[in-house]
Amino acid sequence: MKLSCSSQQLYAGLQMVGSISATASTNPILQAVKIETVKEGLLLSVTDLEVGIQYLIPEVEVVSPGKAVIPEERIAGVLKDWGEEKVQIEVEGTTSRISGKGCSIKLIGFDPEEFPVIPSFEEKDYFEIEGPGLAEMVRRTSFACASERLRHTMTGVLLAIEGSTAKMVATDGRRLAVAKQRISNPHKVKSNSIIPPKAAHQLPRLVAEEKEGVKVKLEEAHMLVKTSKALLCSQLLEGQYPDYTSAIPAENDKRLEIAPEVLAAAIRRVAFITTEERHVIRIGLKKDTLLVRTETPEVGEGSIELPVDYKGSELEIGFNPDFLLDGLKGIGKEPVKMEFKDPNSAAVLKGGQDYLYVAMPIRLTEA
Amino acid sequence: MRKIIHVDMDAFFASVEELDDPGLRGKAVIVSGSPEGRGVVSSASYEARRYGVHSAMPITRARKLCPQAVFVEARIERYAEVAQELLGIFKKYTPLVEPASLDEAYLDVTDTEAIFGGAENIGREIKRRIREEIGLTASIGIGPNKFLAKLASDLRKPDGFVVIKDEEKEEVLRDLPVSKILGVGRATENRLHELGIHTIGDLRALPLEALVEEFGRWGEGLYYLSRGVDESPVVTDWEPKSTGRSVTFERDIKDYGVIRRQLYQLTEEVTSTLRDMGLRAKTITIKIRYSNFKTITRSTTLDTPTDLTETIWRYVDALLRERVDLEDKAVRLVGVTLSNLTVAETLEQLHLFQDQEVKAQRLQEATDQIKEKLGEGSIKKGFLL
């Protein structure tokens, strides 16, 4: 194999695939990138067996076709400050020579035949979604995933497909985020799949800039996501996702609307008066006022009054401030509709038609 | 006037060993430091002390002085467990308990003595309960402050019971050697001897200024202590940082099932302690000591603190299954420790999928009630049978 291409494009491509290379793995081939000449250019592949990513570098001058497997970190390091210069790659056996004007580097790699196979995307039974929309859904939900490995399915993001709607759900049992997005679903895909955290983490980068539709295919045990340049293949998490719909309260009668950035600023400020052990703020509601306050023994107390249009009965409810801030961030710029019931029941935050966030309170018992 | 009780267990480690192994009773028992230790005596029974053996003495020397003694290895975990039981007794009489070490504690009963018929009654009651409920003897000292209480407990060891009244303090102290003052070590003692001062009475003859000049701030302490004045409070605001239990197998174990069952029992015990203390734990650690004494710990930290046995057991079980290498290895000791403890009631993060948590909570309460009524072993998990 012999080719030359833009070093910057190749480096950018390695950045796209490299972050999943399994640095902790004992199998060195999982820390390597496979490069392969294809009709459209040069295809980069990296996999840790759980998630695999392929990325296409177009505009490659292929002198002779072929493939090679090269340690990913090393080639990325070599190309990092290469400059404008083009780079030549010449492969003989398992050794790759990377050269430019005056520079020559030899890297010993692996036999491409030993590189794990990343399944290809068969053009059937998929749905299509806009790239930025998909990235946004992940961004608005994945932070709410559980970090404990024992609640296996809750470490992932649920992707529910039905009709022309894709729904993404994440919860750690204390808060829940649901984001919706329209899809084009000519094959009438219907599925409930749980995307593992690693794949959820990779997705936004790969799809956010995509101008064309992103094709997503959900198989029994795998998810495949295809853009014009990239392919992501991920295992799915097995198991039963908790019945999240029953956790979304429908009858919260204490309702108000507020600008999310205004509320977030108040919560953030008051949260400075909490401690790690007593990480709690109180939201108080009374006529036309929302009160954010906290009191922390031996630290101090603070309260901020925000004017709102509220006519319901009075309420005081405690929350982990981070949970509210996360939800407000998920909502973004739209006004947030907040719905409460009582101090021991879930609160709902809604941003437009596409986003819903449920936060469980902290029960306040006076010590 | 304050009423302070000092409880000092007699030859504590050695007595616990005799308690657990009746064959040792009446013999000269010498507890050596842990195998990692430097080979010094950490506790000697009174029989051994007759031969001049005392703590901190090199084992080799102890062996020469008392060749017929039975030498046993210290089991700190076991002593800590007994110390917990002792604490339980003390706390029946006052919340103001300051454990000074595993084998001694100060109790401030100033505000509670009236309820129990006076400090002396409390002292006798504690002494009796330690004997009857635990099977050990303690020396009790009662005084108007911590210094005099400790001095009193030391005056007629073992099995002593001494009260120093405020009006007697100067007389009691007068002829005692200066080394009886808490904090007077070899260096201070030598310097005082050089100054011709041997008894606490001698010390009282020195003016405050002279003592301060000689010993700095400590001189002030000497001045007041020699007069039986000690304002130091009984410090109770210790927050338990962790609670843990471990067990050493009688012989090294290779059987996964046995190890797992033992860990379950420990989990039950520590979570029960946790609930008694009204605390919840966020961090769960298991400890495995292999037959070659190599010891590993594996931890996990939860999103939300819990005190439920079943919840904590799920994590303990997973740590054992996923993060402990037991292949071809025999295990000598297993332990479970809960840390990152928080007070249970004040702040409680509620859960979305409450059903599961509530069920687990109810199950726990029911199990605890059955155990309370019918005893610890009355209800067991299937795999323990």
Image (tube, coloured by chain):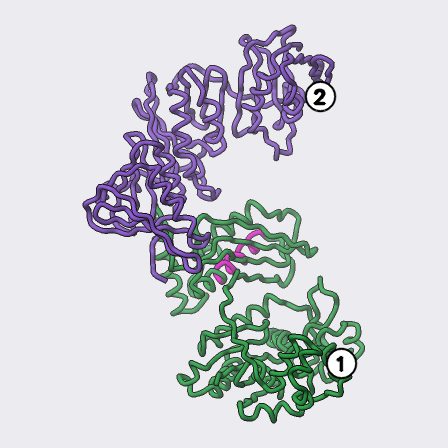
Q: Chain of mark 1?
A: B
Quarter of the image for residue A326 reads: top left
What is the distance, in whole Å, between disc 2 and disc 1 at their CAs?
73 Å
Q: Colour of chain A?
A: purple
Q: Relative to B295, does residue B198 appear above or below in the rendering?
A: below
Badge 2, how many Cα within 10 Å: few under 14, some, many 20+?
some
C-beta proximity under 8 Å, tags 2 and 1: no
Q: Residue B190: which disc?
A: 1
Q: Does B258 lie within the magenta span?
A: yes
Q: Residue A107: which disc?
A: 2
Q: Give A109 or B224, whichever is nearer the viewer.
A: B224
Residue A194 place in picture, x, y as percent: 42, 32
**A63 sits to left or right of A106:** left
* Amino acid on which disc 2 is placed: Leu
Please determine if labels 2 and 1 lie on a single subunit. no
Quarter of the image for residue B45 reads: bottom right
Q: Colour of chain B?
A: green
Specify start and end residues of the magenta stretch as a single range: B256-269
Q: Main secondary structure of the magenta part?
A: helix
Residue B172 place in picture, x, y as percent: 61, 92
Q: Relative to B17, does residue A199 appear above or below in the rendering?
A: above
